[in-house]
Image (tube, rainbow, N blue to C red):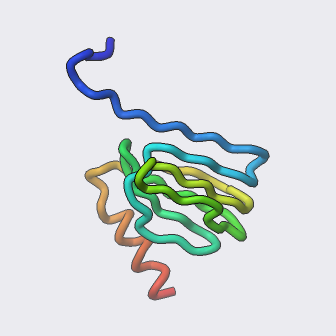
Amino acid sequence: MVDQGKEQKRQEVKMLNRKLLELTGVVNVESFDSEEFLLETELGYLAVKGQNLHMKHLSLEQGMVAIEGLVHSLAYMDGNNTSSKSKGLFGKLFK
């Protein structure tokens, strides 16, 4: 049952043929390159992995991001699991 007194966090994920990913509820783009995007969303950190990824549209005021490329996976990271976030960011630097 939903508590009417609290503001409900909302996120929409829309993907078309694994080539276009549209997200709402995005707070910040932590990092991105052609193989991985790390997004801070209202529901936690979201890692988007794939090939030839690039940002088609970004509006943090509206909380919207559109990513083009071949999407392999979407994975949410727990708020308590900061080591996964750090590993992703620093792991790329020290390949």
Q: Is residue 38 left or right of residue 69?
A: left
Quadrant position of residue 71: bottom right
- Front residue of this view, candidates 83 and 40: 40
Q: Residue furthest left?
A: 5
Q: Position of residue 59 (x, y in %)?
A: 49, 56
Q: Residue furthest right?
A: 17
Q: How many marks?
A: 0
Q: Residue furthest bottom?
A: 94
Q: Is residue 3 left or right of residue 20?
A: left
Is residue 68 depicted above or below 77 in this figure? below
Q: Residue at x 61, y 54 (%)?
A: 66
Q: Position of residue 19 (x, y in %)?
A: 75, 54
Q: Position of residue 34 (x, y in %)?
A: 64, 73
Quadrant position of residue 30: bottom left
Q: Position of residue 23 (x, y in %)?
A: 55, 46
- Front residue of this view, candidates 87 and 24: 24
Q: Residue at x 65, y 50 (%)?
A: 21
Q: Is residue 78 left or right of residue 57?
A: left
Q: Is residue 49 left or right of residue 69?
A: left
Quadrant position of residue 6: top left
Q: Residue at x 30, y 61 (%)?
A: 82
Q: Residue furthest top?
A: 1
Q: Residue at x 39, y 59 (%)?
A: 28
For the N terminus, the quadrant is top left
